[in-house]
Image (cartoon, helix red, strand yellow):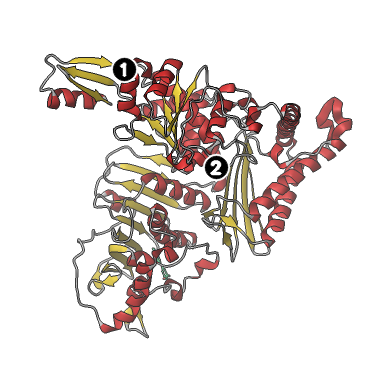
Amino acid sequence: MTQSEITGESRQDDPIKETDEIAVISASNDNLGPGFDDEYSARNIKVLEGLEAVRKRPGMYIGGTGSDGLHHLVWEIVDNSIDEVLAKHASTVLVNMHEDGSLSILDDGRGIPTDIHEPTGKPALEIILTVLHSGGKFDKKSYKYSGGLHGVGISVVNALSEWLDVTVWRDGKIFQQSFRRGFTNGEMTITEGATRTGTRIRFKPDSEIFENTEFSYEILSKRLREMAFLNKGVKIVLRQRSTQKCHTFEYVGGISSFVDFLNETKTPIFKDVIAFNKEKDNIEIDVAMSYNDGYAEQFYAFVNNISTTDGGTHVVGFRSALTKVFNKYLKENPDILGKEKAKAGEIKLTTEDTREGLIAVLSIRVPEPQFEGQTKGKLGNPEVRAIVDQAVSDVLYDYFEQNPNTARPLMDKILLSMKARMAAQKARELTRRKTALEGGSLPGKLADCSEKDPAKCELFIVEGNSAGGSAKQGRDRRIQAILPLRGKILNVEKTRLERVLGSETIRDLINAIGTNVGKDDFDINKIRYHKVVIMTDADVDGAHIRTLLLTFFFRYMPEIIQNGYLYAAQPPLFKLKKGKIEKYAFSDEEKDKIIEEDFGGPDKVTMQRYKGLGEMNPEQLWETTMNPESRILKQVKADDETEADRIFSVLMGDKVEPRRDFITQYAKQVKNLDI
Ligand code: 0RA
């Protein structure tokens, strides 16, 4: 069995044909391009006032006009299509990114109702698309469990689109209507001859509203994959015409498949994913979990299919249950400790001890969720804590009692985590005064800048001493600090935090940055530079060191990446010279272009290939790589953190098989890995 069969995810590398949409969900006739009809009836005006409010204050409806808001438009419609699947009226949702910047969502559900809506004399379809919050009036009870901004209505998408075309197949007919910025653009048309049912909505986000109207394949695929995991049995297809990319997400195992998927690149401690669901007081709880031999934790929590990245009462309840269950299991089974079994009564496992190597997905459904915090990523409902705690404690304890082959190795791992924690604590107490981390003193190797405002400061992490020397001389010492790295950088993917902190190189790095590390100690507000730039040689070793550093940041300071503070410098690969003219090229293509276009051919051109930063003198390094006016910096992003996690596990972990697959599959991209 291949990996994709296990997870139910497939990639299609064959070119996408125009006819594929028909193949995926029976027949569809493509929409004609939208025109604009200035006439609208007086009756419309009242309706349009509602959507005018949406255009005036889009943030109230979709959270903002940045990337999150833009993608919210897609979720709004996809949520409706998925409801059709969950109600067993549809099987497939197809999301298509078109070359004109529009996006379409096609499903094979019942189709949006098209009958005449008596009070207005208009088709329900038109009302649903033009009247704020009207979706619910048409017998859609599926928002029993709604969340946050979700379920504000398709009319909001319409209001914020330059144009929107809808096609409904229903009752043997094809219904179509077009809109512009929420206004109808002609009446609904009816054509005979539909042999299917369903809805297709195609829209182009309005550039008057959104800062950037371009959808991201990564953001879409991450969320659509997540939705396929969270809604067992739903099949979602994502396609991008311009790049011919295509993914199908379908997971018969639901969130257990999610854990399988996360486990693909890890070595689990026990074979079967622990999975269960329970309902109590109208709250549905779904759990899937597994432990691997690593130290990082991956915990995904959802409420009504919405990711709660800042946790909340459900997460607190889950964690408390885990700690309780392991403590109880130890007390009831002291022989696990072998010779030390008399000590069972003294041992008190903490939440920390239960987190190393944990991969868990917690998905709950709550009738009236209260989302809190700046990004609304935290569940507030106080009653949820005890309910989740109780449910998880009960089921998990029973499971461990019945499955000692799972419980035993797991307890061993947790006891090991506990021992490491105690040893580290002791070591910290002994050396508290001395450790540089606690005192936060700056490393001797750091050549700091004179400016103190972090927003203006840049830290260059430079590989090798000679390059460090050039960087120190070449820099703008007012705003640029240099930290040369000597010696090997630890592969943190396979190491626990305590040992990571044993590395002087890493301590220097942490102290220079100023934020400290660790769950309780990390503080992004203490960051000393808003640009942290990794500057390594443009060769294989340089790429390796860069990947090690990226792994460190991703595992231990992900907030630095999330805040957009991490960058990779782009040193040139070639220096080209003809007569007195010198030019730098950052890629093979650029080199060829300079030779052809600037120098008129290779005649009398001399070329130097830079293997290391150290080959450049301070002025050259400044001019090509460090000068804010002329350099190229690549911002490190991790839009899809699940995928980034997999990439780091594959590249830096110890499973050979997936690494080989990955490298063969992505051989081209790995060269400029930009998570
Ligand atoms: C209102 C009522 C019904 C279905 C829908 C809306 C609906 C909306 C969307 C959006 C995308 N796909 C959709 N599919 C359905 C209920 C229809 C009925 O009772 O027949």
Q: Select label 2 or label 1 by which is in front.
A: 2
Where residue 156 sits in the image (x, y, percent)? 38, 67
Image quadrant occupied by the C terminus: top left
- The answer to whether residue 541 is seen in the rendering is no
Q: Nearer the viewer, residue 388 or 5?
A: 388
Depicted 562 relative to depicted 196: above or below: above
Q: Which residue does the image show at 74% across and 33% down from the upper left?
A: 418
Where residue 201 sits in the image (x, y, percent)? 32, 61
Q: Nearer the viewer, residue 453 or 186?
A: 453
For label 2, the residue is: 524
Which amino acid, by three-letter code, is at mark 1? Tyr
Q: Is residue 61 left or right of residue 586?
A: right
- Helix, strand, or loop for circle 2? helix
Which amino acid, by three-letter code, is at mark 2? Ile
Which image quadrant shows ligand 1? bottom left
For label 1, the residue is: 610
Cα–Cα span, label 2 and label 1 = 36 Å
Depicted 663 relative to depicted 223: above or below: above
- Looking at marks 2 and 1 on the same chain, the residue that comes earlier in the sequence is marked by 2
Q: Nearer the viewer, residue 399 or 121?
A: 121
Q: Which residue does the image show at 69% across and 26% down from the upper left?
A: 434
